[in-house]
């Protein structure tokens, strides 16, 4: 008897972009042509491999042979040799770009071997569009356990005990948030999954939604049960069409299986989910703006308190959790709070998922226990190519800061990173080598914040504009030493006087670079140009940069009719 | 809500836990500057100027949005507060147009004041890009986005208070700016130029377009808007003798375009400055003594020769209570006639009659603010945005912010349509059938409140019997409204705990109007919604003092306070106060007087501020009638069409030039305050009448306005107290007329009769509707002389549905002859894409196309109200040589 094989072709966005759909078709054709009954062909989410820059990747189970970067003609070879002939195709195995070694099985790949996959536990191992795969791996077991044996208070206690904190960046204890919502007296409550992942360079939420949507769905149902909600919304950015499709499929399948709808599994508890697509505003990741957006209003934050756990959707108590936070919930129920808290540090339990990008060999998803030093993560990512040195690591996107090479011993931990002027953020980790200009990095993030501020409150809207203005002057060699004082003053006001989290954190890239890379700013000012030649390049390609000086008469430069469209001051 | 104790700048204070830090600070004379806080709006906390510091934790809090808590230690001027506040203002200045010297906001700019208070000179930052100028083309509001600090007040007031929803944010980030929906000019948006945004704008971003640099008034006078019956209190800023701007006194009650920008008619060059007397067929200016002695002589002569029945007096719903009181007293005691009426006859009489028959009161005065509590609001035949803006705001707020359901019952569309959850569009003239059918559903399905009906009403069983023959299916055949919509509306209305009814001219100017009013009262009784806040019956009051004129007895059959003329005892009471006999016979109503004049029975007519020539049907007949008179006396501001026929024309003071009171539709007594001296020799109506009475050797015992007010207070104590001092709205008096003998708090179901549905006669295929517009009011005597309203409103046009226009080969701007059975007029065509195919519309207030010409001189026999809302017409192309 021939061993059944399962071929998993990664169908996550990067692999799709690199030709996974054609590859899948080629496998189908070949398998059908040879009539291989023992082979099932599946798509998968991000393979759990995370080697997103090297795809498309294919895993052949049960042995876990790992082919990477293959093209449709290769499919013919793999089917003929490996699946039919039982001879794995050595020359198509994943080849480590650092060591040059080939790794036949993905368990052998350094990149994975050194990770601890919890949120990403199923990514790449199952077909995300098949609920049976999820159930086979224990999915919805947690839900059954909760509904049959636990009271809502028990669930909250369990989550509190696990030490789970919000993975959206702020790290608010999830159990406490649920307790607040539970305590709010209202007959109608909501659970919202914040999947408006807008940080440049972050794609962890997308990978979870595309690779393991049921984990999030299950997490939301448990959250709903815990706080007493009967309805939930997934706010997914419209730029993630594949995630939207997979989650939609997951919701429908879960409904068919009785995991969603009324009287779940005979428990008397009813819960259902709906997707709301975002419209491309970064600020809608801020929870009150997100709520406004779900309610078809302009996505603008409002002052807190009242917090959404008291006054949320339609004025009703609402719990808003990040995708990864919710994906952790079923595992925590399954394996117990003690197991989860044992993974991280005392303050920050569990694992952290990062989307590793920048000047690094492997761009992809890395999940490591909290407390892992930054340097180790870089190491997992294969280090910097071409023998250059790390200059800085930037976490947290526009809300975070860049830490210099001599601080890379810092552990990944909410408090530790905050103390250093950075933040965990929601999963972006940008590695910069010696060729990166830190003024340029600060300017990039400030430009982003300036375009993505909701425009409502004065310090954020105008302060980011002023900082872009100052940074542009410095970057283009027109800066003066006083500009640094001014920059710090403005950054300080934006940080302390802004209305919402976006404004309160968007100065961090500037403040952190001023702290750790002040010499670089001074060099720009001294030399009258960017010492690395990076800033000039970016400045010159920016459209509409010229002619923005103030002109007497109060009219904007460019005259009447020159509108603000397209960017910052 | 509990009292909490905390420290504010080191002072230990106690306040309720739901008060914001800003409120507490203001109450304790601690100044916290703010740019985005505005009284009626929800806290926005976006300008970040009002930040204060919580000392123990060091946190910065927005004072406007943070409530006080126990043991807080708040500092409003710590180093951090001042540092960040300064930087925020500096940032605003750095992106603000540097044209303070040529800014229409002048010294009223809040940003400039705060910057200067904080000691900020130049921003000390890099200049930042400003949005380009916005090209608006309207005479009301000018926008300069380069001065906008995005405090969002205008947007919020537009969205939350007036709910026009014209303004919003556009774009994001640094590029965020204030814009209309399509980023087009204001006049192509939903904007109605109510001016609420301008009155709230702290900087020069939104200013009055005209005069462009009006400057700061040297004084502000709080008075009452003279246009519709909403009775808005307005702060008029005056420089010298010129009104520079008008802003709402109460930020919660913004004005409309007429109140904000239409008060300049008082400066019209058309104003009369001197009395005129007709000599040799020509009106010639004379002095007061001459005019009055001539007039007294003529009046006396008429009385001597023809008796008091040959004299008639027409008062004005635009005159003050005092003017009207004195005028009717003059008519009754000096002239000895009850031929007294006022212009509200044209739309208001059916309200009085319908309500008397059902509720036993002549008027109801529910507060528009109570609509916030309504679950269902039924609007019938009322174009609220045009005729009663304040009610329109309240209705839209109720729908948008408080979740009320709006049911519209109107053949025509209005700007409320998009707020409605149900729109019933009966054919013209079939509202009565529809209302009856609604009652049928409520009775048949037993949706009424039985307890209320037993306790507070009578006549229910007969009524129930009478309406039982009109099921929605039958009603559908007559009205064209789908039966399920009728059922749905009935269920919603009767099912609501608070259901309000609002109706307007569409009801009161149709055939048998008082019957429709009764039908509405019946509905309200069925839903037990008559006397409760959030329920009630709102009759649209078109004129500023229509209520007051009637309350003051400017009626042929009622004495002041709606007291019965035919009751001897009551009459005797008045005779005692007035010191002379009062004629007992009920007099002629307005249209009857004109008719009598045409027939030669009425010899003299005393008209105060009315223009029958334009406001009554069949101008030709009116002209004949007026020409037929021996004596026509007119008080007016302008040379109106009627004034030009006068034998004696007396220049009257406008609302701005006199003191007095108006009674608004919601039952408030509002004060008019003199803003400036009357132009030339103009006098207020009451003082003209006093002088005339004296000249007629029959002096009235008053020497000042106070004397008149004292007598009114004696006769109508329920109108007391007189309005409180400046700045606030008038007190609500108990309903005038509550002492009417039949009032027992018991309502009576009336079996309404149905008018015959007028079928279009052969050759007149279109139904013509007379519409209001935001830019004009009444017959346009005043709005047509307001510079801004006049320049903005297009010429008189007839709106023709585009399909019909296509069939008739009519194009936009072409002159067409509108022909009814009774008259015709030539007017330009404007294509409409919203009118039903067989309906054309004319605006009431344009003098180029006065709709009166198309109507027959006929009045509803019960109420004397002319039927001037719809008629049947045809359109004739005007051949080239005729143009």
Image: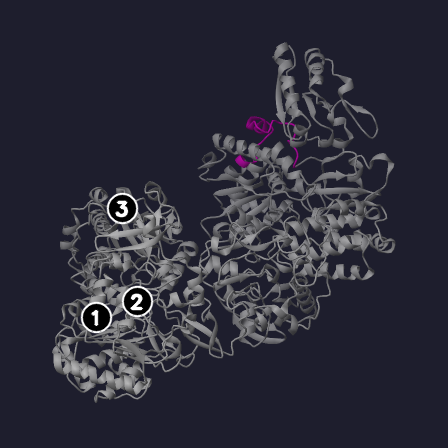
> Which x, y percent locates residue B125?
73, 62
Overall secondary structure of the magenta stretch?
Answer: loop
Q: Chain of mark 2?
A: B
Q: Which mark is residue B627?
A: 1
Q: Are marks 1 and 2 in contact (CB under 8 Å)?
A: no
Disc 3 to disc 1, how far (Cα)?
A: 50 Å
In the rendered image, the quadrant that contains the N terminus of chain A is top right
**Within the image, what quadrant is residue A52 found in?**
top right
SS type, badge 3 = helix
> Which x, y percent locates residue B876?
29, 48
Q: Nearer the viewer, mark 1 or mark 2?
A: 1
Write down the residue under mark 3: B486
**Within the image, what quadrant is residue A78 found in?**
top right
Write down the residue under mark 2: B365
**Residue at left offset 46%, top offset 52%:** A186
Sort mark 1 into few (<14), some (14-19) or many (20+) by Cα contacts within 10 Å. some
Disc 3 to disc 2, how far (Cα)?
A: 28 Å
SS type, badge 1 = helix
Q: Earlier in the sequence, mark 3 or mark 2?
A: 2
In the rendered image, the quadrant that contains the C terminus of chain A is bottom right
């Amino acid at each position: 008897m021939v061993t059944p094989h399962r071929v998993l072709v990664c169908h996550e966005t990067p692999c799709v972009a690199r030709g996974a759909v054609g590859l899948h078709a080629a496998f189908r054709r070949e398998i059908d042509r040879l009539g291989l009954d023992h082979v099932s062909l599946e798509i998968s989410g991000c393979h759990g491999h995370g080697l997103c820059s090297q795809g498309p990747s294919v895993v052949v189970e049960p042995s876990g042979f790992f082919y990477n970067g293959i093209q449709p003609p290769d499919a013919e070879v793999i089917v003929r040799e490996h699946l039919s002939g039982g001879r794995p195709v050595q020359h198509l195995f994943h080849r480590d770009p650092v060591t040059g070694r080939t790794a036949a099985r993905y368990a052998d790949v350094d990149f994975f071997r050194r990770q601890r996959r919890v949120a990403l536990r199923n990514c790449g191992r199952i077909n995300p569009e098949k609920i049976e795969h999820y159930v086979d791996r224990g999915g919805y077991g947690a839900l059954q356990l909760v509904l049959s044996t636990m009271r809502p208070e028990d669930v909250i206690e369990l989550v509190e005990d696990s030490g789970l904190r919000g993975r959206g960046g702020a790290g608010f204890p999830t159990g406490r948030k649920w307790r607040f919502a539970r305590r709010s007296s209202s007959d109608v409550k909501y659970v919202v999954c914040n999947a408006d992942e807008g940080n440049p360079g972050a794609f962890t939420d997308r990978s979870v939604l595309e690779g393991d949507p049921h984990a999030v769905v299950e997490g939301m149902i448990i959250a709903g049960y815990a706080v007493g909600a009967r309805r939930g919304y997934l706010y997914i950015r419209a730029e993630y069409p594949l995630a939207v499709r997979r989650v939609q499929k997951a919701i429908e399948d879960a409904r068919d299986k009785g995991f969603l709808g009324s009287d779940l599994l005979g428990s008397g508890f009813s819960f259902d989910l709906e997707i709301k697509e975002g419209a491309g505003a970064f600020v809608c990741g801020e929870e009150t703006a997100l709520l406004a957006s779900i309610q078809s209003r302009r996505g603008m934050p409002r002052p807190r308190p009242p917090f959404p756990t008291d006054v949320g959707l339609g004025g009703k108590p609402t719990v808003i959790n990040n995708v990864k936070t919710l994906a952790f919930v079923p595992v925590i129920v399954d394996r117990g709070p003690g197991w989860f808290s044992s993974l991280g540090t005392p303050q920050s339990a569990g694992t952290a998922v990062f989307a590793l990008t920048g000047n690094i060999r492997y761009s992809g998803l890395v999940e490591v226990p909290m407390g892992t030093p930054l340097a180790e993560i870089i190491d997992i990512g294969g280090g910097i190519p071409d023998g250059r040195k790390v200059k800085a690591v930037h976490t947290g996107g526009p809300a975070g800061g860049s830490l210099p090479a001599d601080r890379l011993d810092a552990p990944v931990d909410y408090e530790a990173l905050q103390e250093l002027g950075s933040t965990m953020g929601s999963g972006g980790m940008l590695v910069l080598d010696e060729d990166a200009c830190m003024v340029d990095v600060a300017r990039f993030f400030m430009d982003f914040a300036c375009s993505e501020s909701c425009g409502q409150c004065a310090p954020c809207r105008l302060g980011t504009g002023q900082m872009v203005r100052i940074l542009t002057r410095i970057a283009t060699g027109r800066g003066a030493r006083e500009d640094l004082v001014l920059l710090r003053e403005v950054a300080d006001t934006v940080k302390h006087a802004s209305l919402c989290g976006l404004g309160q954190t968007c100065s961090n890239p500037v403040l952190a670079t001023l702290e750790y890379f002040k010499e670089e700013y001074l060099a720009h000012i001294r030399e009258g140009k960017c010492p690395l030649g990076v800033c000039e390049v970016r400045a010159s390609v920016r459209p509409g940069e010229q002619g923005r000086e103030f002109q007497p008469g109060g009219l904007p430069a460019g005259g009447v009719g020159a509108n603000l469209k397209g960017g910052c001051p | 809500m509990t009292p909490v104790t905390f420290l504010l700048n080191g002072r230990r204070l106690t306040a309720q836990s739901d008060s914001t830090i800003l409120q507490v600070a203001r109450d304790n004379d601690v100044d916290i500057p703010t740019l985005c806080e505005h009284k009626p709006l929800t806290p926005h906390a976006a300008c970040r100027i009002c930040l204060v510091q919580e000392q123990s934790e060091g946190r910065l809090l927005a004072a406007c949005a943070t409530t006080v808590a126990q043991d807080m230690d708040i500092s409003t001027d710590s180093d951090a507060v001042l540092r960040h506040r300064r930087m925020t203002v500096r940032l605003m200045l750095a992106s603000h147009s540097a044209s303070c010297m040529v800014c229409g906001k002048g010294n009223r700019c809040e940003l400039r004041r705060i910057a200067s208070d904080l000691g900020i000179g130049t921003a000390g930052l890099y200049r930042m890009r400003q949005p380009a100028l916005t090209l608006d083309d309207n005479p009301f509001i000018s926008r300069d986005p380069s001065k906008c600090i995005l405090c969002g007040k205008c947007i919020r007031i537009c969205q939350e208070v007036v709910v026009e929803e014209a303004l919003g944010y556009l774009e994001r980030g640094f590029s965020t700016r204030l814009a209309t929906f399509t980023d087009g000019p204001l006049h192509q948006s939903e904007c109605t130029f109510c001016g609420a945004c301008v009155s709230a704008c702290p900087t020069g971003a939104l200013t009055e377009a005209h005069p462009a640099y009006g400057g700061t008034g040297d004084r502000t006078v709080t008075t009452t808007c003279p246009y519709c019956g909403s009775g808005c209190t307005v702060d008029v800023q005056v420089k010298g003798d010129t009104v520079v701007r008008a802003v709402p006194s109460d930020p919660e009650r913004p004005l409309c375009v007429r109140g904000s920008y239409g008060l300049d008619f008082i400066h019209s060059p058309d104003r009369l400055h001197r009395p005129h007397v007709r000599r040799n067929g020509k009106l010639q200016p004379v002095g007061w003594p001459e005019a009055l002695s001539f007039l007294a002589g003529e009046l006396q002569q008429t009385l001597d020769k023809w008796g008091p029945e040959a004299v008639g007096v027409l008062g004005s719903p635009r005159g003050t209570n005092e003017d009207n009181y004195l005028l009717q007293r003059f008519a009754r005691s000096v002239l000895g006639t009850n031929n007294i009426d006022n212009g509200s006859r044209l739309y208001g009489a059916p309200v009085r009659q319908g309500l008397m028959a059902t509720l036993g009161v002549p008027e109801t005065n529910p507060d528009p603010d109570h609509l916030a509590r309504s679950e269902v609001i039924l609007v019938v035949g009322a174009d609220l945005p045009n005729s009663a803006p304040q009610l329109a705001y309240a209705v839209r707020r109720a729908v948008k912010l408080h979740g009320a359901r709006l049911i519209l019952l109107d053949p025509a569309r209005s700007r409320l349509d998009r707020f409605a959850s149900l729109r019933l569009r009966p054919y013209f003239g079939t509202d009565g059938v529809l209302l009856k059918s609604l009652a049928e559903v409520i009775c048949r399905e037993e949706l009424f409140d039985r307890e209320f009906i037993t306790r507070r009403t009578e006549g229910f069983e007969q009524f129930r019997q009478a309406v039982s023959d009109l099921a929605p299916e039958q009603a559908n055949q007559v009205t064209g409204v789908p039966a399920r919509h009728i059922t749905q509306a009935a269920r919603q209305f009767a099912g609501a705990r608070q259901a309000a009814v609002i109706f307007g001219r569409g009801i009161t100017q149709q055939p048998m109007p008082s019957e429709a009013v009764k039908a509405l009262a019946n509905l309200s009784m069925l839903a037990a919604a008559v006397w409760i806040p959030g329920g009630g019956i709102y009759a649209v009051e078109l004129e500023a003092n229509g209520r007051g004129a009637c309350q003051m007895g400017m009626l042929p059959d009622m004495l002041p306070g709606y007291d019965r003329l035919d009751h001897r005892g009551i009459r005797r009471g008045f005779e005692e106060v007035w010191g002379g006999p009062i004629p007992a016979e009920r007099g002629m109503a307005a249209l009857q007087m004109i008719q009598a004049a045409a027939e030669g029975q009425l010899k003299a007519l005393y008209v105060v501020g009315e223009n029958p020539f334009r406001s009554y049907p069949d101008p030709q007949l009116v002209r004949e009638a007026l020409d037929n008179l021996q004596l026509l006396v007119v008080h007016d501001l302008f040379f109106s069409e009627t004034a030009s026929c006068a034998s004696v024309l007396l220049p009257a003071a406008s609302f701005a030039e006199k003191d007095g009171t108006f009674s608004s539709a919601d039952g408030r007594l509002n004060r008019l305050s003199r803003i400036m001296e009357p132009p030339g020799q103009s006098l207020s109506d009451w003082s003209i009448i006093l002088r005339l009475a004296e000249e007629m050797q029959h002096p009235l015992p008053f020497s000042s306005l106070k004397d008149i007010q004292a007598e009114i207070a004696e006769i109508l104590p329920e109108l007391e107290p007189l309005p409180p001092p400046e700045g606030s709205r008038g007190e609500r008096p108990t309903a005038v007329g509550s002492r009417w003998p039949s009032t027992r708090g018991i309502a009576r179901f009336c079996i309404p009769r149905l008018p015959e549905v007028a079928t279009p006669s052969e050759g007149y295929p279109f139904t013509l509707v007379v519409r209001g517009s935001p830019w004009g009011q009444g017959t346009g005597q005043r709005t047509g002389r307001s510079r801004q309203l006049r320049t903005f409103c297009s010429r008189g046009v007839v709106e023709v549905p585009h399909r019909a226009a296509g069939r008739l080969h009519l194009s936009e701007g072409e002159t067409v002859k509108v022909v009814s059975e009774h008259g015709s007029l030539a007017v330009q065509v404007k294509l409409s894409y919203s009118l039903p195919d067989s309906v054309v519309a004319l605006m009431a207030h344009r003098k180029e196309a006065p709709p009166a010409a198309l109507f027959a001189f006929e009045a509803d026999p019960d109420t004397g109200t002319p039927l001037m809302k719809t008629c049947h017409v045809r359109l004739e192309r005007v051949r080239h040589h005729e143009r």
